Amino acid sequence: MTPMAINDINDVVAIEKRAFKNPWGKLAFINELACNGAYNFVLKTGQRQHLIAYFCFRLIMAELHVLKVAVTEEYRNKGIASYFFRRCLNAIPDKFDLAFLEVRPSNIAAIRLYKKLGFSVNGKRPGYYTDTDEDAIMMGKIFKGGSYGC
Ligand SMILES: CC(C)(COP(=O)(O)OP(=O)(O)OC[C@H]1O[C@@H](n2cnc3c(N)ncnc32)[C@H](O)[C@@H]1OP(=O)(O)O)[C@@H](O)C(=O)NCCC(=O)NCCS
């Protein structure tokens, strides 16, 4: 696992386009790399260091917002996201009390992942996904006494 670098962005965007109905473009990731409080990680494998997953977080005060979680298709359902998520949280040097995210109700794999990681449903954002007019499920995890990881 390494911090996302500018040279990773073409591979990230290629996965992003396939993984999301409303994908971020290249510029969004470039901006994220320059953003204060942003933590962006990639996971690579094999001799050729093929990029297979990327996760993006933003730390605002002591709240960690999970912005992007994606694993390339052929590596899904093998425990990669469960493993990589924990490693990312442990790599964030600042303390946080709470992590939260939004997820589509139809995204069964992601909801299972987050529940497995200790997140619970704590609300919804009506009409959050404008492309399908889906509400977002809000999920959060409290780190009692604060945490540098999980
Ligand atoms: C969501 C995503 C990141 C999960 O990554 P992953 O590496 O496959 O996840 P894991 O293998 O660690 O599995 C996590 C849990 O989800 C379950 N899961 C994974 N894929 C699943 C699927 N297609 N259907 C149902 N459950 C699934 C696993 O069984 C596991 O739960 P368990 O251990 O209790 O059985 C991946 O599917 C993905 O990149 N999807 C497209 C992008 C996306 O939707 N991101 C989330 C946006 S909120």
Image (tube, rainbow, N blue to C red):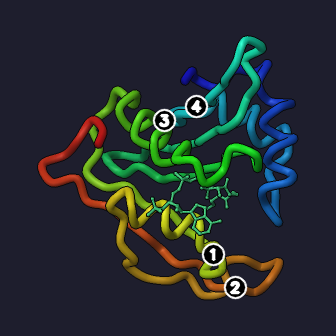
Residue bearing mark 2: 134
Mark 1 closeness class: few <14, some 14–19, many ≥20 residues within 10 Å: some
* Amino acid type, label 2: Glu
With respect to residue 28, does 119 lie above or below?
Answer: below
Disc 3 + disc 4, Cβ < 8 Å:
no
Which quadrant of the structure image shows residue 26? top right
The image's mark for residue 41 is: 4
Mark 2 closeness class: few <14, some 14–19, many ≥20 residues within 10 Å: some
C-alpha separation, residue under disc 3 versus residue under disc 1: 25 Å
C-alpha separation, residue under disc 3 versus residue under disc 4: 13 Å
- Pick the front one: 143 or 127: 143
- Left or right, 31 with respect to 143, comes to right
The image's mark for residue 37 is: 3
The quadrant the C terminus occupies is top left
The quadrant the N terminus occupies is top right
Mark 3 closeness class: few <14, some 14–19, many ≥20 residues within 10 Å: some
Looking at the image, is mark 3 or mark 1 nearer the viewer? 1
- Pick the front one: 58 or 87: 87
Disc 4 + disc 1, Cβ < 8 Å:
no
Q: Say which element carries label 3.
A: loop
Q: Say which element carries label 2.
A: strand
- Left or right, 12 with respect to 75, comes to right
Image coordinates for residue 94, horizontal then vertical, percent: 32, 32
* Mark sitting earlier along the chain (2/1): 1
Residue bearing mark 1: 104
* Mark sitting earlier along the chain (2/3): 3
**Image point 67% across, 23% down: which residue?**
45
* Mark sitting earlier along the chain (3/1): 3
